[in-house]
Image: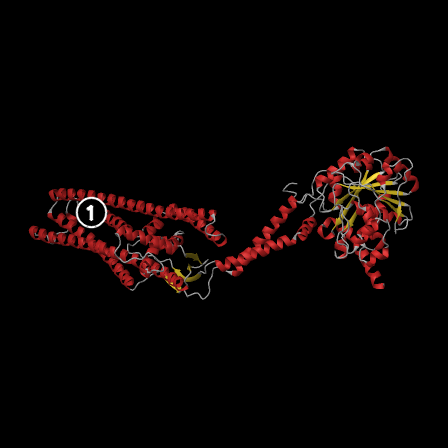
Amino acid sequence: MSLTDPFGLGEPGGEERPGKQIDLKQYLYVLRRRWKVIAAAAVLALAGGAVHFVITPKEYVASTIIQIERRTLNVTGEMAWLENWWNMEYYPTQYELLQSRGLAEEVVRQMRLMEDPSFNPGGWDGVGAGADADRAMLGRLANSLRAGLTVAPVRTTQLVRLSYRSSDPVFAARAADGFAQAFIDRGVEDRSVTVGRAQEFLRDQIDELQDEMSGLEAELTRKSREADLVGVSPETAVGNQRLESLNTDYVGAKRTRITAQSRYEEANATPAEVVASRHAREVIDPLVRAQNALESDYDSMRKTFKPDWPPLVELRDKVERGRREVQEAIQREARRSVQSMYSEYQSALREERRMGQELEALKEEVLDQSSAASQLGNLRLEIESRRELLNEMLRRQSEADVAARQQRNRETNVEIVDHALVPGSPAYPSLRRDLTFALGAGLLLGLVVVVLLELLDRTLKNAEEAEKLLGLPVLAVIPDLAEGAGGSRYPEAYGYGGPQRRTGTGQRASARAGTGRRGTAAERKSAGTVPIELVPHSKPRLAVSEGYRGLRTALLLSTADELRVVAVTSAGAGEGKTVTATNLAVVLAQLGRRVLLLDCDLRKPRLHRLFQLSNREGVVTYLTGGRDAELAVYPTEVPGLAVTPSGPAPPNPSELLSSDRMAELLAGLRTKFDFVILDTPPVLPVTDAVIVSAMTDGAVLCARAGKVLRDDAVACRDRLRRADVRVLGTVLNGFRSAHSGAGKRYHYYETYAYADEAESGSAA
């Protein structure tokens, strides 16, 4: 049996049926037969789910909804808002910031959780072992706090749901609002720092420009007085065009240096996450997308599996490593961008100095070669260019002042839409979720157990399987009497070795054993002791009786040769061979034929107890007697049926059955009776059945459905064939139609027979 064929449909031993498909009904009937196993597994799983619900600590979930808009402070004149709008990493970066350890540390400080004994059992009195120890404790508390936080963006919106899970409903609501407020405060603080540094930078630049202009204007006034050239036009001086061009280049270089320095100062004062997302999107974007995918997988698995499940633990570690890698990449790319801006600033500064040196050299040359009018013109040009630059710086300073006033009003792009409410009922555990999961797991476990039971079940179950395995025709399928009659009137449907357990019968049998007198049918019926072996006679309309009549028909039509002497055997004990032999003899006698039922089971005879006969004489006394010995033949209450018991137990049954005397006995019985039915021992335990069956016209092999092992049935068939025994077919006893879809076709005559019996009962 293979795992691909758990119900033994492809078991070798018989002819393969071409084009045979898997019968789904077979599987459905297997589930029907073992439904109690599945039900028991489901009940146990439901009980486990209920226990899990009872013992699992209650946890509450509170949620805060915030709105994050795409607004970025711009005080340097760049189009940062447009760049930020197309930045695909903006929102993933915000989600990472919400779950960062730094934000959790801010929440710990704001909520004073280091001093809360319920959250920090170790306590903190403010006088620790040092700053490092305090930072370590703060980090541990922050990691513990953010473990209960869940950040869930609302699709296609700017809204983000912050959910916090805790055993204390009040703390869950406080923590959810605490994370939202800390995130807002951090944004306000970052913008305030950026605005302050921008104001300081612009103020320094304006002071420097004003000092330069004051010096130039003083020098212009002094030289004008010294040379008395106040009214001279500067365009008349030699080299003014060259000086003007160089001065324009120098002013441009100075402007470039100021812009580069401004960008560097702003980037140096801006958080690393903003710098990296603004200047290194091509590097950060793949990392953030991969991290988001990991966290999405982790959130999905965390809702299904327990936190200590190894794959979930491994994925959680991978998520933590990914977060660290993203933060490291952000820091690295931020440093790289700042370093690049610093390099640009240094390059612009060097260019400005070079242009200044060239300008100074040209001035000296012009001063040496040109007139005082040219010098004055140059001074006026310098003053004009610096005035333009000063006006631009003043405009930016005004913008920075406006931004500073907005920050004093706590202007922010994050807003709390819904504050967290204290949950009234726990979110975990959920009785419905636990019971649903337990029921699914129980049903799955039950199915697995059923499959395993079927894999381990090596018995024959239905006629199709018997035909395919043994390669023999199934002459009849005898339904289980307990199934047809409710199992109340015939306590031992099929048994080997031992009397029927009938009330009051044992005493009558022992009393009559010495006299050889048989109890009448009226006596047995009055005692309620009608055995299954006589069902075709006493209850001819039962489904079991119809099954034996079908056996009679199949047996008579199974061969064209004369069939007079038939042996009935089985692979092992308890498969109904005595029942089959007796009822076969009864139904043959009902045809008006002379039938002899011969008990050839010399080791554990049973027919004498069944028919309430004396066992002093029988087959053994005939075989051990002389030529003048007579065979003991007893008539029965069934017309045309006679019985010969086995006789006293011999010490050598195999030798007696293989003797010439036995062959002569069977030859003589052929002339006196139309049919001789031999009840033989089982084939596998002893060799008696093989010896006797070889002397008959054929043997009928009995198999008890759901009891006989396939290997035993095959071994029995092979042992009979090796002895040249003609095996006529098999009889499947104890068949339950509700246990196999393959036997559905054998159920029709049962239904009809039961209906007929019911009508008869009602008529009576």
Residue at far right of view: 671
Query: Quadrant location of residue 687?
Result: top right
Report the side of 305 relative to 3 (left or right).
left
- State the residue in front, 26 or 459: 459
**Could you tell me which secondary element the residue under label 1 belongs to?**
helix
The reply to whether residue 540 is in sight is: no
Q: Which residue is mark 1?
A: 247
Q: Is residue 549 above or below residue 410?
A: above
Residue drawn at point x = 52 percent, y = 61 percent: 431
Q: Is residue 221 above or below residue 408?
A: above
Mark 1, Cα crowd under 10 Å, few <14 / some 14-19 / many 20+, is many
Query: Quadrant location of residue 600?
Result: top right
Report the side of 164 relative to 519 (left or right).
left
Residue 534, x across and y down, in percent: 83, 51
Q: Amino acid at mark 1?
A: Asn
Residue drawn at point x = 93 percent, y = 39 percent: 671
Residue 286, x across and y down, in percent: 41, 46
* Location of the N terminus (image quadrant): top right
Residue 666, x across and y down, in percent: 88, 38
Report the side of 449 relative to 376 (left or right).
right
